Amino acid sequence: MKMITGGVCAAKGFKANGIRCGIRANHTDKDLALVVSDVMCTAAAVYTTNLVKGAPIAVTRENISDGRAQAVIVNSGNANTCNADGPEIARKMCGLAANALGLDPTDIIIGSTGVIGQPLSIIPIEKGMAELVSGLRVDGNSDAVEAIMTTDTRKKEAAVEFELDGHTCRIGGMAKGSGMIHPNMATTLIFITTDAAISSDMLQKALSTDVKTSFNMLSIDGDTSTNDTLAILANGLAGNPEISAEGAAFDTFLEALHCVTADLCRKMAADGEGATKMLECRVSHAPDENAAKTVAKSVICSSLLKAAMFGADANWGRVLCAIGYAGVPLDVDRIEVRFESAGGNILVCENGAGVAFSEEKAKKILLEKEIYILIDLHQGEAGATAWGCDLTYDYVKINGDYRT
Amino acid sequence: MKMITGGVCAAKGFKANGIRCGIRANHTDKDLALVVSDVMCTAAAVYTTNLVKGAPIAVTRENISDGRAQAVIVNSGNANTCNADGPEIARKMCGLAANALGLDPTDIIIGSTGVIGQPLSIIPIEKGMAELVSGLRVDGNSDAVEAIMTTDTRKKEAAVEFELDGHTCRIGGMAKGSGMIHPNMATTLIFITTDAAISSDMLQKALSTDVKTSFNMLSIDGDTSTNDTLAILANGLAGNPEISAEGAAFDTFLEALHCVTADLCRKMAADGEGATKMLECRVSHAPDENAAKTVAKSVICSSLLKAAMFGADANWGRVLCAIGYAGVPLDVDRIEVRFESAGGNILVCENGAGVAFSEEKAKKILLEKEIYILIDLHQGEAGATAWGCDLTYDYVKINGDYRT
């Protein structure tokens, strides 16, 4: 299992491109992305749990109901959500892409991200389609990921190479998302491609399993987006015997998938809106997995802890407090808390009470860019990891006037 | 029912005082408050739901288990939480106050607020007790409320005068709390006094009923404190027949209590850490009260909406989004959203979709200090109100380095 480059183009038989078609006036960023497989793929997806859902979600759901898809089209700059003509526009986008690619419109996965409640014009998309398709190439992943960014400051890609029954397989992905993330919001889109052969049922199972310990354990600001979509395409070009049931090959696939998704989670957390630090909270010795996850997310979501981390302030009382209101029955008198980073590791709380520690050493640890909050509950065998970021002036700035 | 001045001293027979005893070195603020009734009171309280609880909560719970108390002692600057000697120190504080007042230590309600996990020395409290008690007076409410402030920038008091069976009664209260509030955090303490005669059972019932629509509907930052305490003392000096069952007098008492608590909620929201605006979210025509409350709180708690309000940005998509992830089954296609303030009222969303509106008019409305977010769900008869504030640079600043 090794991490490689190439993002959504890492797997055999995938091409991508990203261009600026002009969805928002006065913006010069790329805003339209396309990922296409040379051959038909099995497909699976998971979506936001928000009751208010972007129109692209309904259309993607319809289109992959047969477990098949061959391309992904995504725009940024407009979420196409809470618009009366949303579904119509989303279907038109699929139609335009399908037409240019010689595919069936129902084999297209679609995503949109950006402002909610402003009509999305089809005109720039129509005008840009020829350029988008003619530029498709095997190293187009970088342009594609750039075109799905909104407030993201960095491209978020990951890919891994692994073996299945003697065949070299690859899984690669791209993600956007910086704010409105809990697990996923303003808004999170993740597209993953693989050349492994896997049935659509097992692909859906892999995705639904993985998301519980990857994107569902990520929170930037506690706001769950209306448009979150995590979709995966598997084109089978690696030549492995198709995975059609659980077993060793499925487990290997799951492991490879998690390498990609966990890496994307870390990258999304590090690029949280206004973030200066990535926070990873690891809970160990919890009574059960649900308790571990709930505690890890409660800590990662605490605005007060996030602000303290921004200030490199070892205010472990806020960690204890967030554990306390997580809603999980726990013996708080056993809890141990440590902060860790490239700068070292420091014990700050033992048996639920503070211990004497060097503020100087703590400061050095917390001034690093990746902070690990290690919570040992000392009351069981389960564990969980959650990702988040600090809360900064820039988060407020970015979100104080997002629409204009 | 009329609002009056006087805070915790508004009701007959209550005296108060607040002094600086020196709990935190290098701080010059008042840090020790005392409220005393001339005669024994019935008493009731509700506390934080956080599993991690400050030592003062356990001691208060013990002391009012007989439904009686006569005084309240509170310190700021240290929460006396997660300290091995916490309960011992809290009992010593009660003992010192009781001794100076000639009362029984078990008739004292105690509260502490400030940093978690730092030992609280009894020495400054012991030294300051004589000054604190000798300064008790019928207009000492202002000094008392000042002494319980931490990051609060304003004193939060409220009082009301009303009639029960021909007797003039008063209820007054003081609150601290600026951050860590959900319903109540870094940390929320509210003390209410009344000269109405009411049994401890009915007093507890009134408090537990009221808190559901007052402090439990307030959120500054989603963090629930370890020390939240809302306590009430009723000394009966108004001379009304004791309220010992439900009925008209109890309803009047509840109504008067809610005048005080809702006013304190608004004042706490307006003084949320770093806040520039008070947000009040009113949900109407919900399927049931629980749905209405859940939606109102979800909106008030959205970091994205709070940041948009700071920027006076009419980003109603964030309101819809927060309704959508509230976890309540709703028909989103019926939802109507308006923003209102002293600057006017504007419809921004109808039937779950955006409507054309004047950005200029919206800006004018949202630049005011008190913003009302009016959500008509058009699917039932229930309603609820929640209070919060905007998310600002100063929230981050205040919490980036709170301990030092």
Image (cartoon, coloured by chain):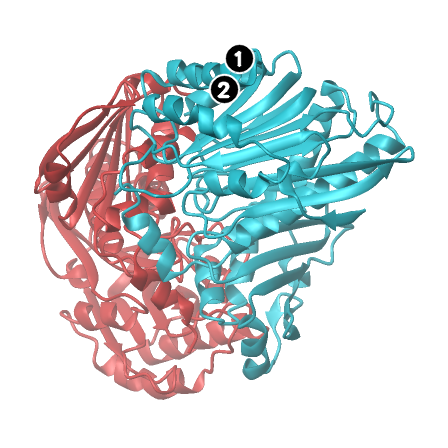
Chain colours: A cyan, B red
Counting residues from the start of the chain, the first of labels 2 and 1 encountered is 2
Q: Separation of disc 2 and disc 1 at Cα?
A: 8 Å
The amino acid type, in three-letter code, at marker 1 is Pro
For label 1, the residue is A105
Q: Secondary structure at mark 2?
A: helix
For label 2, the residue is A97
Q: Is residue A311 left or right of residue B190?
A: right
Location of residue B380 in the rendering, given as x and y in whole percent from the top left corner: 30, 17
Residue B388 visible from this viewpoint:
no
Nearer-the-camera pick, A252 or B350: A252
Nearer-the-camera pick, B155 or A162: A162
Labels 2 and 1 positioned on one and the same chain: yes
Residue A55 visible from this viewpoint:
yes
Q: Is residue B136 left or right of residue B130?
A: left
Circle 1: is it few (<14), some (14-19), or many (20+) Cα within 10 Å? many
Nearer-the-camera pick, A238 or B391: A238
Nearer-the-camera pick, A155 or B186: A155
Location of residue B345 in the rendering, given as x and y in whole percent from the top left corner: 11, 33
Q: Chain of mark 2?
A: A
Quarter-of-image position of residue A107: top right
Location of residue A205 in the rendering, given as x and y in whole percent from the top left corner: 72, 26
Q: Give the mark toward the camera: 2 or 1.
A: 2
Mark 2 and mark 1 in contact? Answer it, CB < 8 Å. yes
